[in-house]
Structures are given as C-alpha cells and as structure tokens.
C-alpha cells in the first residue's frame, strides 16, 4: 500500500511531504487524510532534526558569524529560514490536531531549528531592532555592578515584549541577556530569571492578536533568541537542550514563540509558509 512520503532533492534545502500520488502536501492536511496519522508527526520531527544537522554543516561559518555570506549563500539562507518556518509551523499545527504531547525532545529539535532560522535571517537584515535599541547605556570595559531586571516595553502592550538590562545604583541601564545572568553573573536567582523570561515570552504569544504583527514578531524573535541562546548545550553550539521538571513547559513556550513569529511575518510575506513548487524527479524519500 502506497504511503505519503518525505521528499528532498540534492538541491533542495529542507523537505516537504507528498501524497502517495506525488502531490506536495502540508503535514496538517496529511493527518486528516492518512489512515495512520500518528506515524507522521514523529517522522516529520526526525526529518527536521536531520535537516538541521545538514544545514549546520553546510552554513556553519555563516550562521556562527565568522564570515559574511556570499550572494549565492544569501539566497540559500533565505530559502533555509523559509523552510524552517514552514516545517516548524506544520509540526505545531499537526501536533495540535492530533493532541500530541509536546515533550522536551520536540522542544529541543524545534528550538534548534528556530535558532538556526533566526541566525539565517540575521545577516539578511530580517530581524527587527531589539527592545530599547539605542536607548540603553553602553558599559565600559570591566565589571559592571548592578542588578538584572527584565523590563517590558509597555505594560499596557504586553505583546510588545521586553529585554533584560543591568540597572546600576546611579540609574544607568546596560543591555544584558539571559545567558549573562545565568552564566556570567553572581547573586542571580537563576530559576526565577528563567521563569520570568519564559513568562514574558508566553505573554507576547498570548496577546499577539492585539498588536501589530511586525511588532509582535520582533518582540517574540528577541525573547525567543535570548531564551535559545541560554539553553544551548555549549557556548559554541546551536543545539538547544531542555532539562529538569519544567522542560515540557519550556518546550511549549518555544513552540508558541515559533508559531507566533512565523504567522506574524507571513502577514507581510504571504508565501512564507507555502509549500515549495513541484521539483520534478523525487530524491530521497522517507515513508
């Protein structure tokens, strides 16, 4: 009996599903059509994991910022981030339809994909300004004394996001990140900082429908990126890792951020989440 399958050619970045007849189809549509839909979601997740390994190997220097992309690589990076956006949203939509529990493994794979997608957009100028960009003081060399605080852009607009700063006794505000608080600072209640950051991300997602899509996307991207940076399995790695008793909630927050960012950006880029055009002869397929 013919089954839906995953298709990826040597020239293609990412992958897509096709029906038994070879027609490109989104994963969420397949779960409504297939006789064994629960097989499709873990297969999609495993294929996404493989695709991210390939992308990291192919674009590692550019994604890591050690060199600027060439003109050809800029085109590839655009294709890469669009494929990641589509594949992550497909997974999230299909998992919701099937009632699939979002566990730490799913969060780690999709979080890694989101990290790579954000890094792919960075050299293309497709990330908006960080919250309070241009409004914060710049520290001089040396140790900064103060306390970390997550400041929201506007309490009346929870969808506008926020960011970490170091506030000094003389009232200066220096830019900070969750990673700095967790790994490079003393006297920080790390679990509380993580929860506060996650709460801020969840608040943007929860109120996304109330705000301008581009402002929401920018707010989500910076909170999500800061979160993912702080949850890598090493300082030189792009692989995200969730552990501990709140790993499932951490994963769910990441998935919510991924969906919200992509859907908001698709309001000005209608083709962002569309399936790729038919590619002719099929390459590698996974049933």
Image: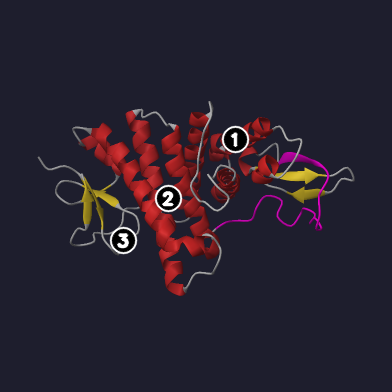
Q: CA distance from mark 2 to mark 1?
A: 21 Å
Query: Which residue carries the number 3 mark?
Result: 12
Q: Nearer the viewer, residue 72 or 184?
A: 184
Left or right of 32 in this view: 86? right
Residue 146 on the magenta segment: yes
Nearer the camera: disc 2 or disc 1 = 1
Query: Which residue carries the number 2 mark?
Result: 85
Nearer the camera: disc 2 or disc 3 = 3
Q: CA distance from mark 2 to mark 3?
A: 15 Å
Q: CA distance from mark 3 to mark 1?
A: 34 Å
Residue 50 percent location from the top left of the image: 35, 49
Q: Which quadrant of the rendered structure holds the N terminus?
A: top left
- Range shown magenta: 127-152
Characterize the local packing of mark 2: few (<14), some (14-19) or many (20 or more) Cα atoms within 10 angstroms: many
Q: Secondary structure at mark 2?
A: helix
Q: Residue at x 65, y 43 (%)?
A: 178
Q: Secondary structure at mark 1?
A: helix
Q: Is residue 125 among the parts visible in the rendering?
A: no
Residues under numbered marks 2 and 1 in contact, where contact means CB atoms less than 8 Å apart: no
Question: Where is residue 190, by image quadrant?
Answer: top right
Residues under numbered marks 3 and 1 in contact, where contact means CB atoms less than 8 Å apart: no
Residue 216 percent location from the top left of the image: 57, 46
Q: Nearer the viewer, residue 233 or 137?
A: 233
Q: Residue furthest left?
A: 1
Q: Between disc 2 and disc 1, whose residue precedes?
A: 2
Left or right of 139 in this view: 7? left
Q: Residue at x 25, y 40 (%)?
A: 30
Residue 140 on the magenta segment: yes
Query: Which residue carries the number 1 mark?
Result: 198
Q: Between disc 2 and disc 3, whose residue precedes?
A: 3
Q: Residue furthest top?
A: 245
């Amino acid at each position: 009996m013919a089954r839906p399958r995953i298709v990826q050619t040597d020239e293609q970045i990412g992958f897509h599903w096709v029906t038994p007849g070879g027609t490109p189809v989104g994963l969420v549509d397949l779960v409504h059509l297939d006789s064994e839909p629960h097989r499709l979601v873990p297969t999609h997740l495993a294929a996404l994991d493989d695709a991210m390994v390939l992308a990291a190997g192919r674009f590692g220097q550019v994604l890591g910022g050690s060199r600027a992309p060439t003109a050809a690589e800029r085109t590839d990076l655009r294709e890469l981030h669009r494929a990641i956006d589509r594949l992550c949203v497909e997974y999230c939509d299909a998992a919701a339809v099937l009632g699939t529990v979002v566990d730490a493994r799913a969060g780690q794979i999709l979080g890694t994909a989101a990290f790579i997608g954000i890094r792919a957009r960075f050299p293309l100028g497709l990330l908006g300004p960080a919250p309070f960009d241009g409004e914060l003081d710049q520290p001089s060399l040396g140790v900064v004394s103060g306390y970390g605080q997550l400041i929201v852009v506007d309490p009346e607009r929870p969808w506008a996001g926020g960011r970490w700063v170091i506030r000094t006794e003389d009232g200066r505000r220096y830019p900070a990140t969750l990673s700095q608080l967790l790994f490079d600072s003393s006297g920080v209640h790390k679990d509380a900082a993580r929860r506060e950051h996650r709460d801020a991300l969840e608040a943007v997602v929860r109120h996304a429908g109330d705000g301008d899509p581009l402002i929401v996307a920018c707010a989500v991207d910076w909170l999500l990126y800061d979160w993912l940076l702080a949850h890598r399995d090493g300082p030189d790695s792009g692989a995200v890792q969730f552990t501990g008793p709140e790993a499932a909630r951490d994963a769910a927050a990441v998935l919510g951020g991924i969906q919200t960012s992509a859907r908001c950006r698709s309001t000005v880029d209608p083709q962002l989440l569309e399936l790729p055009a038919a590619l002719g002869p099929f390459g590698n397929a996974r049933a």
